[in-house]
Image (cartoon, rainbow, N blue to C red):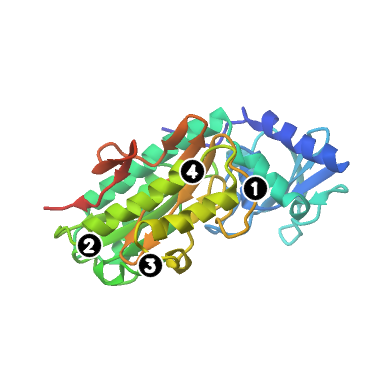
Amino acid sequence: MSHRNDATSDREHKLARIQQLLTARDAPAVHLTSSAALAWLLDGPRPAVPLGGAAVFSATVTRDRQITVTALANEVERLEAEEISGVRWRVIPWHGSLATAPVDALSEADLEPDLRAARAALLPVETDRYRALGSDAARAVTRVLREAEPSWTERELAGRLARAAYEIGAEPAVLLAAGEQRGSVQHPIPTDAPLGRRAMAVVTMVRHGLHANMTRWVEFEPNGESDGVEARLREVEADVLAATRPGADLDELFAEIRRAYARHGFGDDAWTRHHQGGATGYAGRDPKAFPGIGGRVAEAQAFAWNPWIPGAKLEDTVLATSTGIELLTRDPDWPSTSVRGLERPLPLAHH
């Protein structure tokens, strides 16, 4: 199966959204430089060379819907052949500035909140890509964790997850692994520690610019010690998922997850120990939810909440729709339990 980026069917809709923003500002153009905006507008090219690095091209969109992509001379042939189609090209030296627009234009920063809102409401073609990615990513993680052994190091687990990402035509953006010694680390960047009796894997896999975020646990000596705590954390997640509906105020959503920790016995300040996730899509978090964030949930907007307490964490990528929450990163073969009508993952037990 080819995952080459050759889709342009959603571009006219996105250009219309940008045109509306420019008309409202009476501006002739906007110059886009962030990986999130570029991947969104241009149907999911890979904007950077180093994983997670700065984009190696920029794009100027005029009010009459013309796109000019400014590319470095040492990147343009590859980009045109493999990543981006249907645009005008402007080539600059490899040492040139991608931040400079070819015409008078607003900077991306001038329109940042509006552009974020414009890409929040995913189009049907985007949700189709997201469903496919979410399924592929979840199945890939299942394959790796079924093969995992307690003697593996965290680095070995992360390496196998990276390979799994490339095998589905994606790239890894986040790879975290915590063995039993590090289960209380918020962001366990992999070390040489062995997985031991219980381990956590956190991944973000990116394809067509879309980010599939998920967390899974594996147990090699299941003893049920954490079952009650995890069940209560699933209720915290269920509270915020139930509130994540199109039109919902993002400030109120953040207040809800804060209240949920206290409601389910984790205390008033549990939310301060780690970020809680938030909107996702063309960035891992677009942006992380925080007190005073502002804005509202869009129809078909992606979210990845990640409630956390020491030794337990939940995370999946979902779509918020008017008909309810749709799980994207789900493998039917992974063990799960139903929480208010949604299948939520349990630890994978190796017996």
Please tell me how crowded label 1 is: few (under 14), some (14-19), or many (20+) other residues with Cα within 10 Å: some
Q: Which mark is residue 198?
A: 2
Q: Earlier in the sequence, mark 4 or mark 2?
A: 2
Q: Earlier in the sequence, mark 4 or mark 3?
A: 3
Kind of residue at badge 1 = Gly
Q: Nearer the viewer, mark 4 or mark 3?
A: 4
**Element assignment for label 4:** helix
Q: Which mark is residue 243?
A: 4
**Element assignment for label 2:** strand
Q: Quadrant of the N terminus?
A: top left
Residue 269 is situated, as x and y percent measured from the top left of the image, at 45, 68
- How far separated are the C-alphas under marks 1 and 2? 39 Å
Label 1 close to label 4 by CB (< 8 Å): no
Kind of residue at badge 3 = Pro
Nearest to the observer: residue 19 or residue 209: 19
Residue at position x 34%, y 39% in the image: 340
Q: Nearer the viewer, mark 1 or mark 2?
A: 1
Please tell me how crowded label 4 is: few (under 14), some (14-19), or many (20+) other residues with Cα within 10 Å: some
Q: Is residue 260 visible?
A: yes
Q: Which mark is residue 317?
A: none
Residue at position x 60%, y 37% in the image: 121
Q: Earlier in the sequence, mark 1 or mark 2?
A: 2
Residue hosting label 3: 188
- How far separated are the C-alphas under marks 4 and 3? 29 Å
Nearest to the observer: residue 139 or residue 96: 139
Residue hosting label 1: 295
Residue 168 is situated, as x and y percent measured from the top left of the image, at 39, 42
Kind of residue at badge 4 = Ala
Residue 116 is situated, as x and y percent measured from the top left of the image, at 66, 46
